[in-house]
Amino acid sequence: MRALILLFCLLISPVWAQDEITQISYWSDPYGNQGSFWKVVFSGKTYVALKLKSPDKAGEANIALDKAMLAELEEKATELKATPNPLKNDGIQQVWSKNAGDSRVSTLLGRWHGVKLKLIQVHENKNGEFEHQISIDKGYSDFQRALKKAKPILGL
C-alpha cells in the first residue's frame, strides 16, 4: 500500500509542480482598499495577476497580466499620477482601459464627496461580477514598490 501511495505521489507531483500561485507583493491605500501582485504559472506559461479588494464590496477582482500588459499598466499608472484631475462634480472619468479574458483593468480619475482621486480599477466578470478600485494618490510609491517586485517574474 505504501508503494502504491508513493507511486501515485511521484506520478502526480509533476502536475503539482507545473501550476503555481504565489503572492509577490502587497500594498494598500488610506481608504482600506488592498492590492497585490501574484505569480501565476498555468500550463507552463507565467503571468502576473493583479488582485484588488475594496472593503465595502464583496469578493475581489483579478486580472492576469502578461509582459506587455504589465509594462503598459506601469506606463498608464505613471501617466495617471502626472495627470491633473479636472472633475468639478462627483463622478468617474476613465482614462485608459485594457481587457484580458473575462477581466478589464482601467485607470480612472474620480471625485467622491469633493475628494479628487486617481484610481486603478479591475472589473472581473467570471463566476459573478466584481469591480474593485485602489487609489494611487497617496500610495503611489507603495504601488511602485509592489510593481517592482512583480516585474522580474515576467523578465521586465
Image (cartoon, helix red, strand yellow):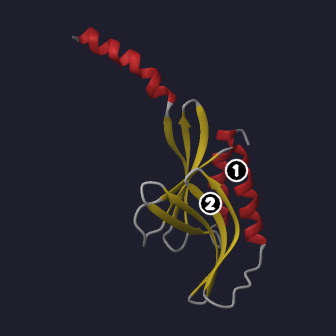
Compared with 92, 95 (above or below) is: above
Residues at badges 1 and 2 in contact (C-beta under 8 Å)? yes
Q: Position of residue 108 (x, y in %)?
A: 66, 72
Q: Quadrant of residue 75?
A: bottom right
* Residue at far top of view: 3
Q: Nearer the viewer, residue 38 or 43?
A: 43
* Residue at far left of view: 1
Instruction: Count every numbered label the image shows and give the total.
Output: 2
Mark 1 belongs to which amino acid? Met
Q: Residue at x 60, y 90 (%)?
A: 114
Q: Position of residue 30 (x, y in %)?
A: 54, 73
In-image side of 129 versus 149 (left or right): left
In-image side of 77 versus 31 (left or right): right
Q: Name the residue carrying label 2.
A: 105
Q: Residue 69's mark? A: 1
The answer for how far apart the CA atoms under marks 1 and 2 are is: 10 Å
**On-image quarter of the N terminus:** top left
Q: Nearer the viewer, residue 56 or 125?
A: 125
Mark 1 residue crowding within 10 angstroms, few (<14) / some (14–19) / many (20+) = some
Q: Position of residue 140 (x, y in %)?
A: 66, 66
Q: Residue at x 48, y 70 (%)?
A: 32
- The answer to which of marks 1 and 2 sits earlier in the sequence is 1
Q: Residue at x 64, y 40 (%)?
A: 153
Q: Position of residue 132 (x, y in %)?
A: 52, 66
